[in-house]
Image (spheres, helix red, strand yellow):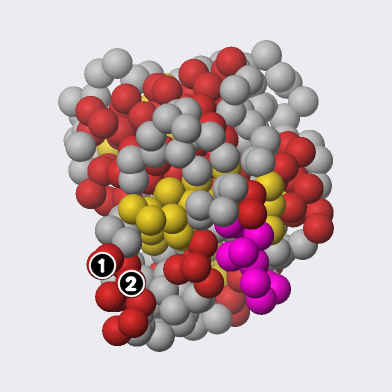
């Protein structure tokens, strides 16, 4: 089978197409013919060797896979070849075939395509559990950083579904800001690349500031501090800015007297509870099927173009979920045309 392998840590040039033996499912495993492999910012960090829980070279990256069950291992019941499934993998998603634990292979309803399914895993679950972790209370204001991205685009919508009042997103271009307000339904969108954007957030929240700030950058010395309301909760789930600057003593003191919180979040803690993951995925899928949750998967790349996909994400040129297409399979059981990229496909 064809797969993308990281032979050594480094730039996008280390993502190399290789031929590998097709794996055989062991006890409690299923072998999946991969129609869509999700790409996350954590994959870029793992490729560079700066993601703490990441694998060591050589490895096949990819934490999300969706496709059709090819075969099952010993002891597997309730899943048969031909079933449509999706799930989290330790690594190995960037390949034509991937092994999933039968316990983590989630049945995929006929009305949800493979690319959408991958968006509901790392990014969908992260957005969902962040809203609960904050928690976002009815009528509160929420600020979502990188609101046009994979996690952000879902967080904007989930915050509204969970009862948030004002939802403000940040995005770097006019097109992305229009997407955040017109397509995702945010109250307002601001340009975080321009100085003073925190004041725009305050204006959108009636001068109060955001009760909850969901931050992918980890830039604790940035303007996010100025956008936070008294009693606000600032949750950071990424460190995309690479900013090593810390909070000043003055800021820490002000946060103390304003009863503000700075909270780090990682999905692994929530994902360790299988029952909670199942609950979250059921609600996410239900929202997709009912049309309440829009999942954008326009940026789709052929397996051989994994390096281009990583470059596009790093350059912030993507919107919504970014997926690789290892094998072109029918979108739905009744769809014999095949293919995943129906819009801005890059196959």
Quarter of image, res 166: top right
Task: In this rendered view, identify the residue nearer to me: 53 or 190.
Answer: 190
* Residues rendered magenta in the picture: 192-202
Task: In this rendered view, identify the residue nearer to me: 185 or 259.
Answer: 259
Residue 64 location (% of width, % of height): 45, 46
Q: Quick check: 27 above or below 106?
A: below
Residue 42 location (% of width, % of height): 44, 63
Q: Is residue 194 magenta?
A: yes
How would you rate the neighbour count of disc 2 (Cα within 10 Å): few for under 14, some for 14-19, many for 20 or more? few
Tag of residue 81: none
Q: Is residue 133 magenta?
A: no
Residue beneath disc 2:
254
**C-beta proximity under 8 Å, tags 2 and 1:** yes
Residue beneath disc 1:
256
Residue 48 location (% of width, % of height): 45, 78
Q: Secondary structure at mark 1?
A: helix
Residue 29 location (% of width, % of height): 28, 36
The residue sitting at 67% across, 14% down in the picture is 334
Task: In this rendered view, identify the residue nearer to me: 177 or 74.
Answer: 177
Q: Secondary structure at mark 2?
A: helix
In 3D space, how far apart are the residues under numbered discs 2 and 1 (Cα atoms)? 5 Å
The residue sitting at 51% across, 54% down in the picture is 209
The residue sitting at 47% across, 28% down in the picture is 163
């Amino acid at each position: 089978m064809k797969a993308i392998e990281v032979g050594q840590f480094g730039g996008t040039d280390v993502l190399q197409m290789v031929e590998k033996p097709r794996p055989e499912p062991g006890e409690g495993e299923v072998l999946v013919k991969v129609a869509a492999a999700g790409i996350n910012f954590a994959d870029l960090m793992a490729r560079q060797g700066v993601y703490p829980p990441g694998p060591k070279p050589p490895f096949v990256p990819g934490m999300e896979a969706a496709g059709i069950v090819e075969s099952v291992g010993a002891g597997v019941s309730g899943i048969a070849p031909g079933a449509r499934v999706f799930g989290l993998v330790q690594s190995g998603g960037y390949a034509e075939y991937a092994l999933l634990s039968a316990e983590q292979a989630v049945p995929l309803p006929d009305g949800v395509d493979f690319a959408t399914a991958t968006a509901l895993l790392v990014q969908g679950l992260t957005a969902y559990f962040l809203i609960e972790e904050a928690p976002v209370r009815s009528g509160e204001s929420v600020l979502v950083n990188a609101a046009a991205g994979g996690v952000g685009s879902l967080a904007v919508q989930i915050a509204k579904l969970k009862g948030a009042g004002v939802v403000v997103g940040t995005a770097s271009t006019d097109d992305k800001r229009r997407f955040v307000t017109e397509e995702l339904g945010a109250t307002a969108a601001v340009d975080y690349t321009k100085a003073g954007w925190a004041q725009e957030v305050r204006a959108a929240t009636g001068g109060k500031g955001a009760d909850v700030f969901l931050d992918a950058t980890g830039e604790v010395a940035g303007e996010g501090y100025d956008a936070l309301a008294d009693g606000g909760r600032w949750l950071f789930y990424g460190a995309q800015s690479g900013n090593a600057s810390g909070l000043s003593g003055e800021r820490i003191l002000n946060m103390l007297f304003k009863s503000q919180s700075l909270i780090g979040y990682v999905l692994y803690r929530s994902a360790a509870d299988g029952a909670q993951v199942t609950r979250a995925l059921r609600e996410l899928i239900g929202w997709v099927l009912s049309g309440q949750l829009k999942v954008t998967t326009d940026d789709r790349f052929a397996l051989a173009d994994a390096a281009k996909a990583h470059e596009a994400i790093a350059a912030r040129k993507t919107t919504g979920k970014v997926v690789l297409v290892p094998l072109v399979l029918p979108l739905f059981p009744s769809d014999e045309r095949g293919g995943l990229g129906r819009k801005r496909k890059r196959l």
